[in-house]
Amino acid sequence: MTSIQEFSVSRTTVTSRICQSVLLICVFWMLFIASGDNKASQGKIIDICVFIVLASMWNLLTGFSGLISIGQQAFVGLGAYSLIVLANGVGINIYLAVIPSAIIVAIISIPLGLVAFRLRGGYFAIGTWVIAEVVRLIVKNNQSSVIGAGTGTSLEVSESLKSGRYQVTTFIAIAVAVVSVVFVYLFLRSRFGLALQSVRDNETGARSLGVDSYRVRFVAYIVASFFTSLAAATYYIKGLSVQPDAAFNIGSWTAPIIVMVVIGGIGTIEGPIIGAVLYYLVRDFVSKHEFFSDPTFLILTGVVALIFALFVKGGIWGLLLRKFPKLTVFPVKRRVHIENFQFDQRGN
Amino acid sequence: MSLLEVRNISAGYGQFQALFDISLNLNEGAAIAVIGANGAGKSTLLKSIAGVVDVIFGEIIFDGESIVNLQPHERLNRGIALVPEGRRIFRSLTVDENLSIGAYSRRQGVWNRELVYEVFPMLAKLTDRRADKLSGGEQQALAIGRALMSNPRLLLLDEVSLGLAPIVVKKLYEILPRIRATGCSLIYVEQDTNQALSASEYAYCLLEGQVSLEGKPSDLSREQIASAYFGIGVNK
Amino acid sequence: MNWFNAIIQGVLVGGLYAMYATGLSVSFGVMRLVNLAHGDLAVGSAFIASTFCLATGLSPFLAIFVVLPLSALVGIGLQVAVFNRVVGVDPSYQIVATFGLSIAIQNVLLQQYAANPRALNIGEFGNQSLKLVGDDVVIGLFPLSRFVVAVLVLVLLSLFIGRTRIGRAFRATSDDPDIARLMGVNIRSIYAVAFAIAVTTVALAGIFNGMQTQFSAADGPALLIYAFESVIIGGLGSLWGTLCGGIILGISQTIGAEIDPGWKQLIGHLVFLIVLLVRPMGIFGKDELR
């Protein structure tokens, strides 16, 4: 046995610093476009940022907490409608209404979570979907003029805010995406995040060590609801019109989110970002080609999700890691450096 | 004539190797004991014989043929039955149904439901009771009975005494000679050495995945066993 | 408003829901698998039956005898190609894989059959009915026979699971697959049989549904949800519970529709949520099953 002489514990590595710098450059590039006049590019950035948030949040649930949700559309729709109520109903400035509407949804998610948490595993998944359906039907049957029942309604933008809406929305979208990703990163690095992952890996074991598995999962669920609706509200400042069947649609929200995360890599912070960007680029490319009708694209999406889930469980990021084991953008693990030795806390 | 011959096997789970170069021999009709501390690799040894754990190196010869590449159910068909650690009876099935699953392989022989109930009278009154409603001793009897229903030539008993009251363990061990009388060979794995040693003709002691001591129980001194068991004062 | 009639109709629809749910219940019970493409398999079968009828001019009832063996084969094929790889692994991959399958099937149907709804025409039989209590309660002959068939399927299945050798192996595998293997049970073939049963029953339900109402490519998810709600309301691990769950769901929906046509699904979902809150193990569920 050699005695441990000098050692230090750190999380950052050289590669993680390089990758973070690259990411930072991307953010600045997006900010540059946001300040310009190109609405088409701004629209794309908004969409990509929104999907990065949605994917990261689904991944926080499924990849890090073991809560498989296929009902994220509930929070997209609720985010949209909270924004409608606050802006059209109460008359709050649309930009200022974004955060309050996400807070409202986070509060609503508590009773919804109490119901969903009665179920486990695959049945939890279907349960979240039923809940999303219930919320959709309630909204659809609501006859008040603010909600607009089945036909939906549009966000009213006051004259003073009309100019520069795309610019402001792009800034908001970038901010929301950056805050979400950084939040997830810090969240997972915290004591709480460690508890969360221990529950995912071995619930009984974690509980025997005093982790309240119900509570940590519930908090993750609320956090995910908050950020999902924050992204949704941002999206609808761009889109303006809201219909219940579209806002609560599993096919236009949760399906692409799942595909993004699974191709990027479930259970990593980097995976959903890669997946969201890749998915968006592919969809953008495909939409310009006749061959890929909507169904064809969706068939391919489904098959790709299936193939990744069966054969490429780590996703693209997992493949990259296998090739470059030191690669990391968001180091969550602690590394111990002892002279020339280095091993991480999981003993891999 | 040797029924089972384990030749220099190494085995483990994924990256973790639990057995290192273990050899063992069992004659037809004999009973041997495998003892050792928690984590010594006893259960892994039985599981590799039953086919649930993959053997990395080495050979397992059963009745003159290599079985190392056979699936668990194929080994069962040749007459190897495992009574797993922790009993693992089918909880939602009745006692009777558990025995039926034991006979799933349809191997012919002396053992049938009636004989099991005769040997384990405590089960005879409980035929229609759900197995999760049985006491620990009854569950262990059922687990042994279930294995016997496949008419094994070799019965692997993993920690029969675990978690049972001494009186119940004594009762179960009293029944084992009846099983041997049908021509079935036995391998006992126990942490509690006394019962296993007194019931067997030959014993192996495992320590950290290797055989640390072997011999006839009558030839082994208490000190020898203790040092082989705990790994104190052993010269490698 | 005719409450009594609503209840009768609800019971009859409930039989159909139970048939949807049976496969979900069996595949979860035996292999802990939640198949999100379950409803899409029902819709797919109805489309195949419809194609068969259009091509041959034969009755949909004959199509059943063609489609069911086919769906059993599809079930075995899916089990071997897809589900064997997700049994026992992290459930998130199970969900993603079956969700991907569901999206793929839905859109293949959409591409093949467009968005237009179809129906299976069973002719006069579809219009015949029994009138009870004066003319207040009308029981369609077809919904009634469909209910009887559903109950019959459940009886046969519960006899199969309760009394036969393979049925015992089903339950043993459900309890402890590792030990079942040690007892000589080939669990892969057990899984294949279980999944063949799941697909066959849901295919029959899909065809029965198409004989009474129109169906379209996007209906699968709704059917999955009805099946799921029936299973949870009734309680996991109990086929009779599933029948009762289906009936409760059916009655809730018909009563909801009596109050306001827009509330049909909503009331059904709400009853499901209430059961989940008040009695999470379901009405007939045993508490040891999660």
Image: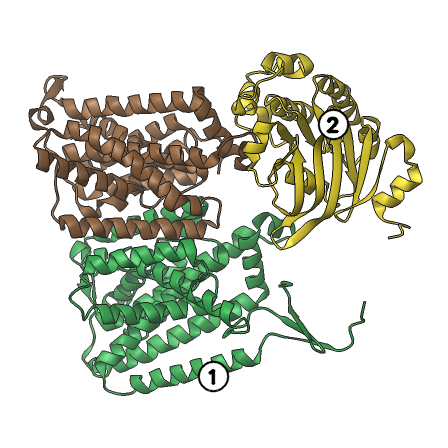
Up the image or down, B118 lies above or below A134; here it is above
In this rendering, does residue C204 appear at all?
no
C186 in relation to C93, above or below = above
Q: Which chain is green?
A: A
Q: Secondary structure at mark 1?
A: helix
Q: Are discs 2 and 1 both within one chain? A: no
Whole-percent x, y for residue C186 in the image: 48, 33
**Chain letter of the residue beneath label 1 in the structure image:** A
Examine the rendered structure and indicate whether residue B160 appears above or below residue C262.
above
> Which residue is at the front of the view, A339 or C182?
C182
Letter of the chain in yellow: B
**Rendered position, A8 above or below C184:** below
Circles 2 and 1: CB distance less than 8 Å? no
Label 2 Cα neighbours within 10 Å, binned few <14 / some 14-19 / many ≥20: few
- Neighbor class of circle 1 (other Cα within 10 Å; few <14, some 14-19, many 20+) is few
**Residue on which disc 2 sits:** B1
Q: Could you say where residue A16 lies in the image, as x and y percent from the top left?
A: 53, 78
Name the residue tied to disc 1. A21
What kind of residue is marked 1? Ser
Chain ID, mark 2: B
Any idea which chain is the brown one in this picture?
C
Q: In the visual, does A132 lie left or right of A292?
A: right
